[in-house]
Image (cartoon, helix red, strand yellow):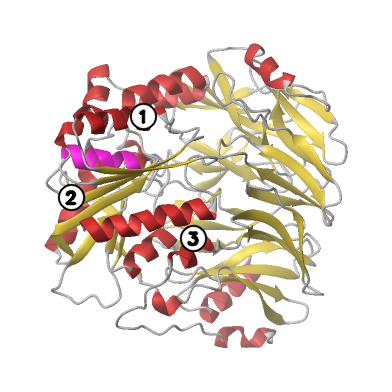
Amino acid sequence: MNRPLAALAALSLATAVHAAAPLVPIETFFGTHFIRAAQLSPDGRRVAFLAPNGGTYSLALLDLDTRKVAVPVHIEGDSIQSFYWKGNEHLVFEGDIGGIEVPQVAVTDLEGKRVFSLLKAQTTKLLGSVYSGFVFSERTEDPEHIYAIGFTTDSNYSNEEHILAQNQPDRLLLKIDIHNGARTLLGPATDGDPSASLGEFGVDHQGRVRTAVRNKGDRAELLYRDDTADTWRVIKRFEANRPLWIVLGFTGDGSGVYINDHESADAGALRVFDPSTDTLGPALFTPEGGEIGQDYPPSSGLVFSPKDGRLIGLRYTTDKLHFHWFDPKYAALQSKIEHSFPGYIAGIASISDDETRILIRTASDRDPGAYYLLDLTKGTLGLVTAVAPQIHPANMAPVLPISFAARDGLEIHGYLTLPQGFTPGMPVPLVLHPHGGPFGPRDNWRFDPEVQLLANRGYGVLQVNFRGSGGYGNRFLQAGYREWGGKMQDDLSDGVKWAIEKGYADPKRVAIFGASYGGYATLAGLVFTPDLYKCGINYVGVSDLVELTRRKYEEEDAGLLSFYKQAIDSSSKELHDRSPVNFVERIRVPLLNAYGENDPRVDIAQWVELKGQLDKYHKTYEFMLAKDEGHGFAHSQDAVAFYTKVEAFLKANL
């Protein structure tokens, strides 16, 4: 589908609105996965993406000239999670084994003839989830290396490295050659103090490791140095897990550091730190009603020119994702793109090195969208691929941004999705759908297959960005600290009451369904507000806060420990009193539970303990255990089986 660039502004993707949508099969939402994470090659000749293949994801490649698709890498039984280009002839990718979230990083040529491991994964558990290392900077400017944290400079390491990691506290900053795995030591990734931890390393456009965050107890420090071999110096001190400055990147010439300044603006402001004077420059951009970056997928939000590394724009999120461009050329282009795709979030996904070819991503609440190639030299706009051609937007329900006042007056935002055919004055059964995290993640205005499945079955869906969610500033985020089962839960309950008072929800037909922290919120809702819900669905949820914190204290590093203590921990009595497993006798309604056997975040022990209490009090419940799955079901057959249970459970109980 090629068209002149002049016709961009005339392109429209209008969709019809029906009074009632036909029933869409579960397989449409979960059996056939969506294309993910398309990226343009540096020369603009190819697009790589993650494509569904036999229930998992493979690395796929589209030649834009021949339109031929190749699959250089497919991991039987497991999915590739992410990838990025290294030059025009290689792709670095990261996989997962059985859902245990242990990274296996490898590189492939475009034919898949030579797949070479760069960071080898540990496939068994040894004193917790142990891994060989992880990439801390993709550095696409360097086509020959990845920048990673590991435990040895030996490029021919074996699983002995994982045992070594248990006895060697010093992690290493490494530059790894993608062709032969040769490791160049950049320096230690620790400062020798076992009570402190270094992380969040920042690498500039020249490949120098210049910033880091040091956590020690309840304090944190932002560190800076001019070059990788230099000594760290402190440029900002703050309370742990309450960062005042966040590094987002570096100026093209390396003279300055882009800082998201949360000290002068609660929701942040983009400013440049000058290390020669230790001063911050004036605000370059301050988002109104949101934050710089995007949560889906997580991103710093800054967009740099592939030619010279200069900052050309950024992404920021309010109730929706937005684009702001500092470069007038891109600002004018963004205006044309948005005019061409009304009702969609549409913007630049990636840019060729010469900035003549641009990959555009479109999406909306009712449409997963598509990728388009804009060729500025030829003046053409062409469809590369739809993200999910099996989805028909006309059969999906609109997602409406909403807000309400919590019982203590705090403004809470979220989204309400009503089934097609909703009539004012005729409330529908409602599913409260709390997100996971809880600290930092949030719900967004986007196509969500879970939400659309529920709406297609006739349910209203309420997504509440309760206090503790990201995107609303530091004060809002930190207002959720130590509020598991407390004010965060109150925000969810207040959202349900708002939906009832507005006439959207039938008060006698309300369910709660969430995953991870959302699973905890489901259990907490059923035991602490048992009159509010008709049934609940707990998907990989926490049931015992005492057990959660105990395991975290055993397994994690100093920086994460300080976070758990500040954000979750409190007195042992309070943790006990906010753990749903201790109050199972209060549950009055049916409960559906689902867990992954290999979950590294919410250990299966959380379910074992909960099951014991459900059986003890003779509660009505259903259960699904998925082998070779972790924190959520990545294999399509498991996802379809789970949502088939969800559909039947809600039909029977709501």
- Image vertical order of residue 477 relative to residue 604, above or below: below
Of residues 562 and 107, the one nearer the viewer is: 107
CA–CA distance in space, label 1 to label 3: 28 Å
Residue 583: x and y in percent read 19, 30
Report which residue position mark 3 lands on.
30
- Residue bearing mark 2: 533
Q: Residue at coordinates 30% horizontally, 37% vertically from top-left?
A: 479
Q: Earlier in the sequence, mark 2 or mark 1?
A: 2
Between 21 and 200, the residue placed more toward the observer is 21
Q: Residue 448: say if magenta.
A: no
Amino acid identity at mark 3: Phe
Instruction: Give the number of marks.
Output: 3
Q: From where the camera sits, is residue 207 visible?
A: no
- Spatial CA span between label 3 and label 2: 27 Å
Question: Which residue lies under the disc numbered 1?
Answer: 608
Instruction: Indicate the quadrant where residue 565 lies.
Output: top left
